[in-house]
Amino acid sequence: MKLLKEVIIERGRIISSDVLKVDSFLNHQIDPELMKEIGKEFSRRFQEAGITKILTIESSGIAPAVMTGLELGVPVVFARKRKSLTLVDNLLTAKVYSFTKKETNEISVSNEHLHQEDVVLIIDDFLANGQAVRGLMDIVKQAHSTMAGVGAVIEKGFQSGGNLLREQGIHVESLAIIESLASNQITFREETE
Ligand code: 5GP
């Protein structure tokens, strides 16, 4: 997605050879116009998949997921990372090791919002080693819903998550695939032009 790649170049900040900071448009301050275009692009790519629900994880997945839900006309559910007083019964849970925080969180979703008939699209901000997506896939499985695919705003192609999912036959769409952050430079994979 050309616009996204331009924004990443202009406003992304390389923290290290494997971490990109995108706090000015995706992870802290959010650019609504960009999110709207991201929603349209995911919707276009998964138009034929018969999606009935979008599943993401708080907090940075919520903005792109909501805009995609708006375009596809389906609800968006986000997995919580923290315990909630109002979220106690009938929980579907999974353990997720966070790449950026270096800690394991138990994520949870109420089974009231995911059903056997649901066809689920998983959306997240980054796809790195695929831990977050795997946790969400585990929850989809526990709900006996159908997995339609995975949409990542930014995939780091030099980490294994995306390719492992594709090798499993999962439909993965990443709007920008970063091949390298080495030498303080962002290099994109060609086919995401
Ligand atoms: P994974 O679970 O695929 O290893 O990592 C994905 C999760 O870690 C995302 O939900 C995202 O929040 C975070 N993450 C992974 N890599 C980066 C990165 O380079 N920059 C930022 N800002 N977050 C990242």
Image (tube, grey):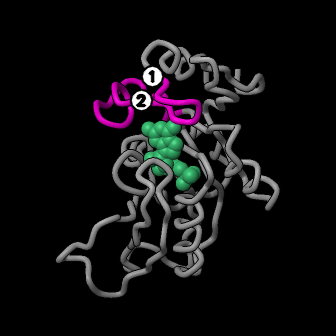
Q: In this view, does 25 lie to the left or right of 120?
A: left
Q: Which residue is drawn at 42% across and 61% down?
A: 103
Name the spot of residue 145 as percent of width and height, x first: 58, 75
Name the spot of residue 63 as percent of width and height, x first: 37, 42
- Foreground: 174 or 162? 162
Tell me if residue 133 comes above or below residue 180 in the rendering: below
Amino acid carrying mark 2 in the image: Val
Q: Which residue is drawn at 65% across and 56% down?
A: 149
Q: Nearer the viewer, mark 1 or mark 2?
A: 1
Q: What element carries label 2?
A: loop
Q: Is residue 33 left or right of residue 138?
A: left
Amino acid carrying mark 1 in the image: Arg
Image disc number at residue 13: 1
- If the image is split into quadrants, where does the C terminus sit? top right
Of mark 1 and mark 2, the one earlier in the sequence is 1
Q: Is mark 2 within 8 Å of ligand 1?
A: yes
Specify the farthest residue to the bottom.
89
Residue bearing the label numbered 2: 22
Span highlighted in magenta in the image:
14-40
Name the spot of residue 93 as percent of width and height, x first: 44, 78
- If the image is split into quadrants, where does the N terminus sit? top right
Magenta span has 30? yes
The quarter of the displayed image where residue 157 is located = top right
Tell me if residue 1 comes above or below residue 111 in the rendering: above
Q: Do the residues labelled 1 and 2 touch (CB within 8 Å)?
A: yes
